[in-house]
Amino acid sequence: MLTYDDLLSGLEDSWLAVGLHEHAFVESVIPATHDRTCKIELFPEHDEPLTSENIPPWLEIGFTWSAVHQLISEGREIPTDPLDLTWTYTVTLLGSQERNDIELVRMFQRAVQMAFVRYYPAEAAEMDPVSVEVRRIYQSDGQKLYVESIQLVSTTVSDIFEQWSDRDISGLRALLRTELQLASAVITNLSDAFPPRGRGGYRTVDAA
């Protein structure tokens, strides 16, 4: 029987195995509904401190553990609610860009598509391009506003119960590992597609 802790520990083991690192971990509880929400920010290796000039593509995973999920974990025979994991990928670019929004969105979509082809080739052949939101962050120089940075943001959702057919905990861990491998591949592809290539534009000593 799946518990909140099983899901969380499986996610943690998986993101560590694929080389992602926890940047922020937020849990909240809504007493009225007994919903327990978890959001985790995951980053690849990066230089410190993080600034708008060196921030790599990163991922936020979120899910809500509802009262229904808790009752099922306690052995109650009730219909299963979807257990959705939300995957939000963010790329931050400096404000001055040669490419227009359409080009940036298509670059993002290609990077995601390439990752899906690697891990879910059958699904990738039929999937529509992911939706990508273009956000602009403005600053003022005292006289006028200028674009400090641009964020490309894309969110997808996967239902764990829908994919986890055997209801075995080891099977769940294997599923989460594959999901995080896919996420890591997406981040790697985004890092290759957009500057500063995940490490502030600098190459490691081995690569130099």
Image (tube, rainbow, N blue to C red):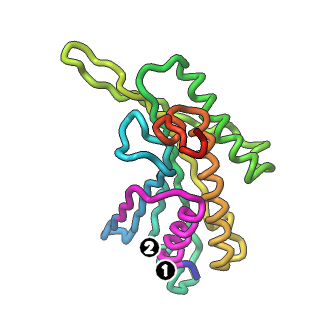
Asked if residue 170 is positioned above or below residue 55 in the image, the reply reads: below
Give the residue pinned by disc 1.
71
Magenta residue check for 190: no
Q: Quadrant of the N terminus?
A: bottom right
User: Residue 84's x, y, as percent?
Assistant: 55, 60
Q: Quadrant of the C terminus?
A: top right
Quarter of the figure with residue 163: bottom right
Disc 2 residue type (three-letter) = Ala
Marks 1 & 2, CB-CB < 8 Å contact: yes
The residue sitting at 57% across, 48% down in the picture is 156
Disc 1 residue type (three-letter) = Leu
User: Residue 34's x, y, as percent?
Assistant: 37, 71
* Magenta highlight range: 3-27
Give the residue pinned by disc 2.
67
The residue sitting at 38% across, 35% down in the picture is 52
Is label 2 in a helix, a strand or a loop? helix
Asked if residue 96 is positioned above or below residue 46 in the image, the reply reads: above
The residue sitting at 57% across, 52% down in the picture is 157
Asked if residue 161 is positioned above or below residue 199 in the image, the reply reads: below
Is label 1 in a helix, a strand or a loop? helix
